[in-house]
Image (tube, rainbow, N blue to C red):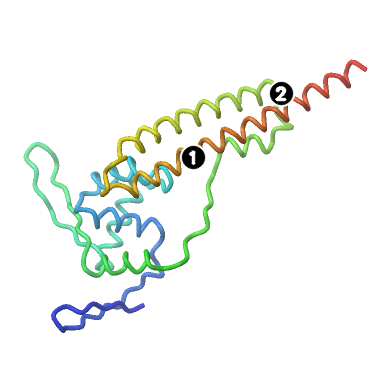
Amino acid sequence: MSLFTIVGGTVTVWTMYTTDLSGTSYAVLGILEKQPRSGYDLSAFADRTVAHFWPISRTLVYRELARLERLGLATGTPVAQERLPDKRVYTITAEGRAAFDDWLARPTFEEARFRSGFLLKLFFGLRVPAERVTQLLEDYRHSLQEEASSLRVISDRLAGDTAKRFGRLTALYGVRSAEARLAWLDEVEAELHVRSASAKREETT
């Protein structure tokens, strides 16, 4: 695809192969758009923010930075440090910013897919003793409560900061999602309890 900007009457055209870029690529570009960062700093920032809905491993961060630099969407600059190993700080380029803005402007987005070890085990629940299923549900409830609590703290901390309103809204999405899953868990436990009670009555008749 071709992107162009007009600065002072001069038209600059860039041709980039953004079809090869993934959601993770754009996540990295978006973080760099906020400010230049080293791979370590970018990974740490991602862990505190987008990892709640778009996990990015540190290995993948460095791989994406190298690829974005090859494509001319980011540029890396070596930075010497006195008491720590030298690092490479990456900055988004004009081409990278144009590609990122183009991605944001597109009406489509990737279909949400996720992995859940809990749901995978629940799916095969018939192979598990009833008491183990009960423990599985209790463990999941505890993890959801912790997730909702931690995201609520983030949402509350960002409240009132206009510059971080979208960060607060994404955190609030996580809170509401956890609350919805807790409500669903109530239904699961209620249904399994009914079935368990029914099975016991059949055994005694």
Name which quarter of the figure residue 14 lies in: bottom left
**Amino acid type, callout 1:** Arg
Disc 1 secondary structure class: helix
**Which quadrant, please, contains the C terminus?**
top right
| Vertical placement of residue 36 versus 72, above or below | above
| Vertical placement of residue 15 versus 56, above or below | below
In this picture, residue 155 sits left or right of residue 35: right
In this picture, residue 76 sits left or right of residue 43: left
User: Residue 179 versus residue 78: which sits nearer the camera?
Assistant: 179
In the current view of this chain or complex, which residue is farthest to the top? Answer: 204
In this picture, residue 159 sits left or right of residue 9: right
**Amino acid type, callout 2:** Ala
Q: Nearer the viewer, mark 2 or mark 1?
A: 1
Residue drawn where x is 40% and y is 67% of the image? 20
Residue 57, x across and y down, in percent: 37, 45
Residue 77, x across and y down, in percent: 14, 57
| Residues tagged 2 and 1 counted as in contact (Cβ below 8 A) | no
* Count of picture labels: 2
First-in-chain label (2 vs 1): 2
**Which quadrant, please, contains the N terminus?**
bottom left
The residue where tag 1 is placed is 176
Residue drawn where x is 45% and y is 38% of the image? 175
The residue where tag 2 is placed is 130
